[in-house]
Each structure stands twice: as structure tokens, then as C-alpha cells.
Amino acid sequence: MRHLLICLPWCWLPMAASAQVSATSDYLARMDRDGDGRVSLSEYQQWMSYAFDARDADGDGVLAAAELPGGKGAPISRASHLQILAQRFQRQDANRDGYLSARELAAPPL
């Protein structure tokens, strides 16, 4: 199930997109909670955790197999989920300034 952990945040992107986001600038505007024109790690994690929170039916901070897509797989803790998102954020932060710009958000995930 390691593959599931690696793709998990991006597999859930369509669920997060239910907020009617259709362009990179829309993602930036919605993720950028403080309006500074860039996305911090905490803003990124908050936005990308939408689906995790929605699937965590019992609110225990762990997605059990029954809460995962397809009803299978190893449990995933919120801490593990946030760590995966932090790793993705680091890879997308091309200029290493600690924030994601619209250009960095538009880059395909690595």
C-alpha cells in the first residue's frame, strides 16, 4: 500500500476541487488564506487535508481501511498524511523560499 500513501494527496484532489476550482490562480486564491499571494506549508496542508478530514468518519485522526478509497489498505494517520504533504510541498518549492507561487503550484507533482 506504499503506492497509496505516495499518491494519496493528489488522488484526493478532485474532492478538494469540489469547491469549483478550475485554474491554478483559483487554487492559489483558495489556498492562500492570508492573501499574501503565495502558499505556505500550513496553508497547503490545510487545503490538501480536506479529503482526509471528510473521509475520517469517526474523527479519530486515522483513516482505517474502511475509510480509504476501495475500503482496503493500511491505516493512515493524520500525522503521516501531513508528513507526505510536507514532502510534496518541499519538492514543488523549486526556489526553496518556503512558499509555493502560482507557477510552482502549476508544476506537475514529482
Image (tube, grey):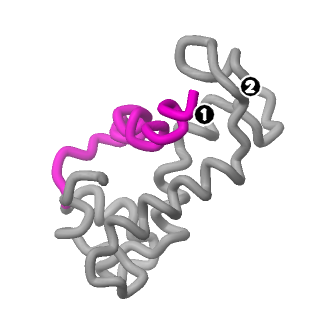
Q: Position of residue 69 (x, y in %)?
A: 54, 19
Q: Which residues are magenta?
A: 1-24
- The secondary element bearing badge 1 is classed as helix
Residue drawn at 70 percent across, 47 percent down: 78
Instruction: Report the predominant secondary structure element of the magenta stretch.
Output: helix
Residue 59 lies in quadrant = top right
For label 1, the crowd category at 10 Å Cα-Cα, with few meaning under 14, some 14 to 19 and many 20 or more, is: few
- The secondary element bearing badge 2 is classed as loop
Residue 11 lies in quadrant = top left
Mark earlier in primary sequence (2, 1): 1
Image height of 3 relative to 24, above or below: above
Quadrant of image for the N terminus:
top right
Q: Amino acid at mark 2?
A: Ala
Residue drawn at 39 percent across, 70 percent down: 32
Residue drawn at 63 percent across, 40 percent down: 53
Q: Position of residue 33 (x, y in %)?
A: 45, 70
Cα gap from disc 2 to disc 1, whole angstroms? 13 Å
For discs 2 and 1, the disc positioned in front in the rendered view: 2
Is 13 colored magenta in this rendering? yes
* Extreme residue in the front direction: 2
Numbered circles on residues, count: 2
User: Residue 64's mark?
Assistant: 2
Q: Amino acid at mark 1?
A: Ala
Residue 59 relative to residue 5: left or right: right
Residue designated by label 1: 54
